[in-house]
Image (spheres, grey):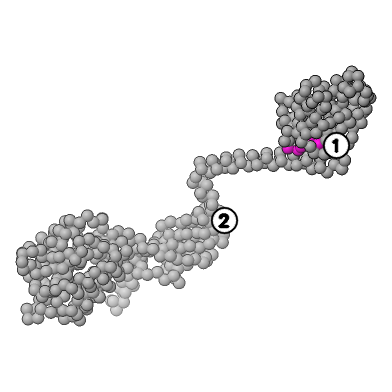
Amino acid sequence: MKLSRFLPLFLAAFLYNMAISQEMVIKALDERAYPLIKINLEFAGFSSVNINELKVLENNELAAFSLDSVSINKEKRIVSLLVDESLLYDQNALKNLFSAINYFTSQLNRNDLLNIFLAKANTDLTACQIPLSFEYTSDYKLFNVFIKEYFSKQKISAAKPNISCAIAETVDFIESKNLPPGQKSLFIFTRNITDKSEPESKIRQKAENSGITLIQIDFPWNNELAEVDSNKLSDVLTEEFYSIKSNIGLDASKIGKSYIISYYSQHDKKQNTVAIKYKNKTITSSYFRSGKLAFLKENLLFTGIIGGLFMIALLLIINLLITKRQMAKSIIKLKNKKEFEAIDAAHILDEPFHPNKTLYGNGSIIPYVTIDLDGDIIKHELKKLRTTLGRHSDNDILLANLTISNHHAAITNEGGIFYIQDNESTNGTFVNEIKITKAAIKSGDAVRLGKAKLFLTY
């Protein structure tokens, strides 16, 4: 009756301890690739996570997600194994050791370091232990192959080694190596320590001062039987390996695990709330939708430079297109004209055309050209042997029109005969609507340079 009164208190205490030992925390929420949302979720105190019990809700609506697991236990662990040689005298014991080491290495992380030492009988005043490798390794597969190869060729002695000396020398060896920062552990597989060459308390103090945790697994010494029962060794080793995992942080329930939850948002709100539920726990977070604009916000200077260059390039392209369009219109207009409008010389000239008043006649008239450019009439006397025409201001006759090239053509007087020569102009030079490079012209010929119409009088 009295026990039933305290049962709710025990139950409440149990649930409370479970609650404080299991934690679920959102470490980060990345919305920069919106609508793809990524959440870094960390669990502590859970031996495993059942994805079927995990739910993600955005704005109180369930979201389909994927879950990727990564370990966050990144601290290196330096593991040393010191094995009493007399324990391995039996071949079955050797096999059990290999099996135990294989299991042990399967529990380590990729960045952990491992080495093994053999405690030998000090019969010739040499070292009490032998490191099977002078370097630590994280290649556990190669390590297991090396161990098997070594023991298959090495002669194992059943003599009792000096364990205290071997432990002290192994601690010295670990100290002498330039190992990275991490949790150092030395596992000792031996018979009971009976020698008093160095008190056990001093050995442990020395290891503690070096930051090394000692874990000792003792087997009884039997003077009548130097061999250890192989089944017993296998059972004890396996049991001890299970129990000592927590000493080097290998217990899955004590290792924090980080998970990446990925899902696609179905909401276009500026601010969104995310809730993650697992069993009886719920944690929430929120984010502001930024998407690709997040990169621009974080790199304002870079964005400004790129934007300025883009605007300059855009203006240049627009200007080029406008100019090209204007020239194309002018060319099309000229090409589509069915016939060249012959301008009546009597209409253009102030006086009627008198063919007799030329250089071939009485010479009373100085040769000149009459030019019609968009209704503007230009007259120019040909007093020079070479008269240039074009859009540039250094020409004798300036024709300000986009259809006229800078130095379009030239009129030459060669022995009383006038020629017009094209200077590789863009739109060409035409005499009586025939494109020419150089041709003789006379009174009455219709010459065209782009939009300009030219008539010679002499």
Task: Check disc 1: other Cα within 10 Å, few if <14, some if 14-19, many if 20+.
Answer: some
Q: Give the alpha-carbon distance from disc 1 to disc 2, as whole Å.
A: 73 Å
Q: Residue 269: which quarter of the image?
A: bottom right
Q: Is residue 429 magenta?
A: yes
Amino acid at the residue labelled 1: Asn
Q: Quadrant of the N terminus?
A: bottom left
Above-or-below relation of 178 to 422: below
Residue at horizontal 74 percent and vertical 39 percent from the top: 327
Across and down, in percent, residue 37 comes to: 50, 59
Please tell me how crowded label 2 is: few (under 14), some (14-19), or many (20+) other residues with Cα within 10 Å. few
Seen in the image, is 17 located left or right of residue 165? right
* Mark 2, secondary structure of its residue: loop
Q: Position of residue 412 (x, y in %)?
A: 78, 27
Q: Is residue 431 magenta?
A: no
Residue at mark 2 = 269
Residue span colored magenta: 426-430
Tell us which disc is closer to us: 1 or 2.
Answer: 1
Pick whichever of labels 1 and 2 is earlier in the sequence. Answer: 2
Q: Which residue is mark 1?
A: 432
Of residues 151 and 422, the one drawn nearer to the viewer in this rendering: 422
Q: Is residue 54 visible?
A: yes
376 over 26 or under it: above or below: above
